[in-house]
Amino acid sequence: MKVLVATEKPFAKKAVDGIRAIFDKAGYQTVLLEKYTDKAQLLEAVADVDAMIIRSDKVTAEVIAAARNLKIVVRAGAGYDNVDLAAASAKGVVVMNTPGQNSNAVAELALAMMIFMSRNRFTPGTGSEIQGKTLAIHAYGNVGKLVGRKGKALGMNVIAYDPFITDAAVFEKDGVEKVDSVEDLYSRADFLSLHIPATLQTVKSIGYDLMMSMPKGATLVNTARKEVIDEEGVMRAMTEREDLKYITDIAPEAAADMAEKFGKRFFATPKKMGAETAEANINAGLAAASQIVDYFVNGNVKFQVNK
Ligand code: 3PG
């Protein structure tokens, strides 16, 4: 078996070593394609591999067509909006993710972003504290739950909404208040932490109305996907309301415009860094490698996302 680790944004060395060790033990060959700058490099590298580990790397229909022996793609991470699932399914390629493996890194970044914005982005001037503020969590999955628990530990009043969780006990056991509508959530949010995936239903779903409903001085914190934001709507709200703030992990399309218009009320990381910790790389990378071996050896499809 030949496995390609294709990471435009490389894993920490320890994670790569761990992945290699898992494949060596299984008798598989590991091929590493890191920091590639051109799609052609990926198309060439996939030509004869049986499996792939990726991060946010784009596995399009073209990539899948070029990968003649491909049987499985594992996205070392949570969101798999970068993989053309229909094209994979059409060719019988199994797609998996590694849910939960990098969640803590993303949750820590979300909290850090709240403090960073509350302290004027670490520039001089009087800031405010996050203790006692309402932290509203949009989608209570692996990351949302961790953000909630950490927010509680920091003395925040935590509320959450998840359209797919009706059981209030899921929230109550974390001391988190379940909110029944997205409108209610945003209208109470001093900090709104976004944890929805990018899907047909969610793309551009966060915009003017929700932003305008937020309390005075509120901050939208996006460690999910830039695609879920209706950038025009958010910009219109921030233009009309000079108290609103937006911080995002990965620059929006309108980043330059937003930076110029909103100054310290806006911040974007230059490259997505939510899962950029050695721990997250090791957790997700090793899980991905183990899942590939488990699939080939035992047919385990527990984490398949294109069933
Ligand atoms: C994820 O969906 O797991 C995160 O967005 C991490 O993405 P990355 O592997 O590109 O850092």
Image (cartoon, rainbow, N blue to C red):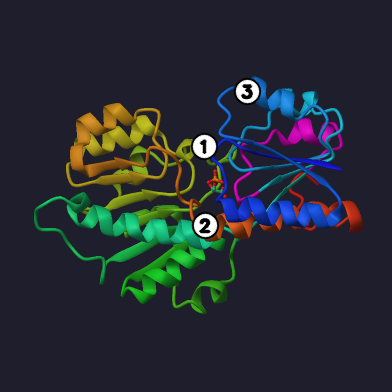
Q: Farthest right residue?
A: 298
Residue contact at pointers 1 and 2, CB within 8 angstroms = no
| Whether the residue under disc 2 has CB within 8 Å of ligand 1 | no
Could you tell which of marks 1 and 2 lies nearer the N-terminus?
1
Instruction: Look at the picture and state if 68 lies above or below 205.
Output: above
Q: Farthest left residue?
A: 125
Choose top left, top right, bottom left or bottom right for residue 268. top left
Name the residue that disc number 1 marks: 203
**For residue 39, which numbered disc appears in the image?**
3
Which amino acid, mark 2? Ala
Could you tell which of marks 3 and 1 lies nearer the N-terminus?
3
- Percent across and percent down for residue 176 are 44, 73
Residue at 33%, 54% (x, y): give it: 113
Image quadrant occupied by the N terminus = top right
Q: Nearer the viewer, mark 1 or mark 2?
A: 2
- Verify whether residue 262 appears in magenta: no
- Verify whether residue 89 appears in magenta: yes
Q: Is residue 77 left or right of residue 298?
A: left
Which amino acid, mark 1? Val
Cα gap from disc 3 to disc 1, whole angstroms:
25 Å
Q: Is residue 205 left or right of residue 245?
A: right
- Percent across and percent down for residue 61 are 73, 26
